[in-house]
Amino acid sequence: MVNKLRRWLREGLILLSLLAGMMWLMDAWRAPQAPVAFDSTPLYTLDGERVILAALSEEEPLLIYFWATWCGVCRYTTPDVARLQAQGKNVLTIALRSGDEPTLTHWLARKGFSFPVVNDASGALSRRWDISVTPTLIVVSKGEVVSTTSGWTSYWGMLLRLWWAKVS
């Protein structure tokens, strides 16, 4: 019985190690590339606020969340991003090809989300960042990209990335 349990435990650890390695490789392969002067380029949120990523990330790490209203996985990640923002974390979201501003504003109101959103209706901003997958999360600290990941990420995963950016 003990030998069988040890074998299952060993095989489980091997499987978890393989999965973690595959996830790390996929993140490295799909990693967005920060455009030149991204930290000083002004962006405008739906409510007309002018934001500059370097300024936003100077005091606290900034979570940039590329998402879309049509993205199935974003359905699970977006509420966690909203939760982080509601708890006072530094969050900026970029809606990729999700319609014009009135359509996007209506969608956000219907879902009850109030986080800051930059509308990338044409996808030009996402192309400059080389975003190939939604959702994509980028952590910027003091104007430098310190972490990226794409696909589903848990609330705790996002919180851990923000914490790590702050302490390192």
Image (cartoon, helix red, strand yellow):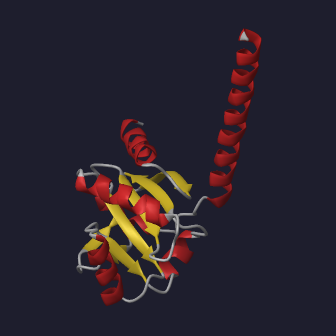
Q: Residue at x 65, y 47 (%)?
A: 23
> Which quadrant: the N terminus?
top right
Image quadrant where residue 90 sits: bottom left
Q: Nearer the viewer, residue 165 or 152?
A: 152
Q: Left or right? Give the position of 8 relative to 72.
A: right
Q: Residue at x 72, y 38 (%)?
A: 18
Image quadrant where residue 163 sits: top left
The answer to whether residue 44 of the structure is visible from this angle is no
Label tally: 0
- Residue 17 lies, with reference to residue 133, above or below; the image says above
Q: Nearer the viewer, residue 22 or 56?
A: 22
The answer to whether residue 122 of the structure is visible from this angle is yes
> Which quadrant: the C terminus?
top left
- Residue 12 lies, with reference to residue 1, above or below; the image says below
Q: Left or right? Give the position of 122 relative to 89.
A: right
- Residue 12 lies, with reference to residue 53, above or below; the image says above
- Residue 47 lies, with reference to residue 153, above or below; the image says below
Q: Nearer the viewer, residue 51 or 103?
A: 103
Residue 20, given in percent of the width and then of the height, sits at 65, 40
Q: Residue at x 33, y 55 (%)?
A: 57
Residue 68, given in percent of the width and then of the height, sits at 47, 74
Residue 136, given in percent of the width and then of the height, sits at 51, 62
Residue 166, given in percent of the width and then of the height, sits at 36, 41
